[in-house]
Image (cartoon, rainbow, N blue to C red):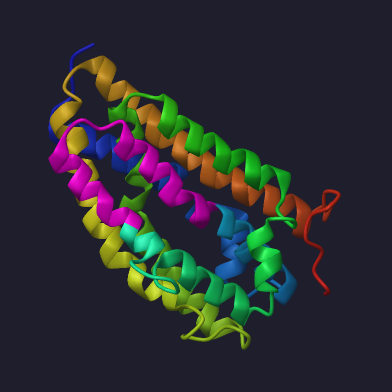
């Protein structure tokens, strides 16, 4: 097997997103199309909080394994994006404003008591992947950010239009994410194209992106099973009032 050119590798990565990114999942089609109840939207936001909260932990573990100062400096911006520079700032704080706006008790959200087991297993698998795999694979797994601006655009337009309990203020998280995702994905893509030169390395980064797509898809599978069909909520997980 011959190595792909940098352009061919990028095309293969983008093809994975076109086929496997979670914007194609049935739950997201319901969510963005206005077909979810408030309780289903609450369940989505509550479970997604765990993913948001673990992103800086995942990124800190990647930084700790990186011996290149330039890459560490670049990756540090992700920690600031999510944690902020002071209390009440950053992506995690903005996500909690979303759950507040959906009438979820903040202490309950942060406690993770209502989390679906499938959400916990999927997110933990992603954190472990970044900690344990080669640095190139860990960076490649972040490339779902190549596709996130499109899904965020769909989400903001569809949900603000279709749900009277969602406001632009509570959706502040999404208004700030696209430029951050574009910046981060551009760096990660350049890194992968520069460092994945052998067929083996290229296959590993393609597999890493497929894995990350599977993580996001599995999270929505868990939501769909619990709150759409067959509506079998696991013991201890969040139960919507509606």
Q: Image height check: is 68 above or below 96?
A: above
Q: Image height check: is 41 above or below 220?
A: below
Q: Residue 87: percent from the left, percent from the top? A: 43, 71
Q: Which residues are magenta?
A: 51-79
Q: Nearer the viewer, residue 206 or 176?
A: 176
Q: Image height check: is 42 above or below 214?
A: below
How many numbered marks does the figure carry? 0
Residue 150: image quadrant is bottom left
Query: Is residue 52 covered in magenta?
Result: yes
Residue 69: image quadrant is top left
Relative side of 225 to 167, left or right: right
Q: Nearer the viewer, residue 139 or 154?
A: 139
Q: Image height check: is 88 above or below 24?
A: below
Relative side of 163 to 105, left or right: left
Name the residue at the front extreme. Answer: 86
Point 64% across, 38% down: residue: 121
Q: Main secondary structure of the magenta part?
A: helix
Relative side of 218 to 239, left or right: left
Relative side of 89 to 136, left or right: right
Point 37% across, 75% down: residue: 175
Q: Quadrant of the C terminus?
A: bottom right
Residue 124: image quadrant is top right
Q: Residue 5: percent from the left, percent from the top? A: 13, 28
State whether residue 56 appears in this view.
yes
Q: Quadrant of the N terminus?
A: top left
Q: Nearer the viewer, residue 3 or 232?
A: 232
State whether residue 228 appears in this view.
no
Point 52% across, 84% down: residue: 161
Q: Residue 171: percent from the left, percent from the top? A: 48, 78
Q: Residue 190: percent from the left, percent from the top? A: 16, 41
């Amino acid at each position: 097997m011959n190595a792909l050119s940098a352009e061919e590798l990028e095309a293969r990565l983008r093809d994975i997103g076109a086929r496997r990114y979670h914007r194609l999942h049935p739950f997201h089609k319901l969510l963005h199309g206005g077909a979810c109840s408030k309780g289903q939207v609450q369940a989505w936001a509550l479970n997604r909080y765990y993913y948001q909260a673990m992103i800086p932990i995942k990124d800190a573990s990647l930084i700790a394994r990186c011996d290149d100062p330039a890459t560490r400096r670049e990756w540090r911006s992700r920690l600031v994006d999510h944690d902020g520079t002071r209390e009440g700032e950053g992506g995690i704080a903005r996500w909690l404003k979303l759950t507040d706006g959906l009438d979820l008790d903040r202490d309950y959200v942060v406690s993770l008591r209502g989390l679906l087991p499938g959400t916990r297993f999927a997110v933990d698998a992603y954190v472990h992947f970044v900690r344990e795999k080669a640095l190139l694979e860990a960076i490649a797994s972040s490339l779902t950010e190549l596709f996130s601006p499109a899904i965020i655009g769909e989400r903001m337009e569809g949900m603000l239009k279709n749900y009277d309990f969602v406001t632009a203020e509570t959706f502040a998280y999404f208004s700030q994410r696209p430029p951050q995702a574009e910046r981060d994905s551009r760096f990660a893509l350049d890194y992968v194209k520069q460092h994945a030169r052998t067929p083996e390395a290229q296959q590993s980064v393609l597999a890493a992106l497929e894995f990350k797509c599977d993580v996001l898809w599995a999270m929505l599978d868990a939501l769909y099973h619990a709150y759409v069909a067959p509506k079998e909520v696991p013991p201890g997980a969040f139960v919507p009032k509606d």
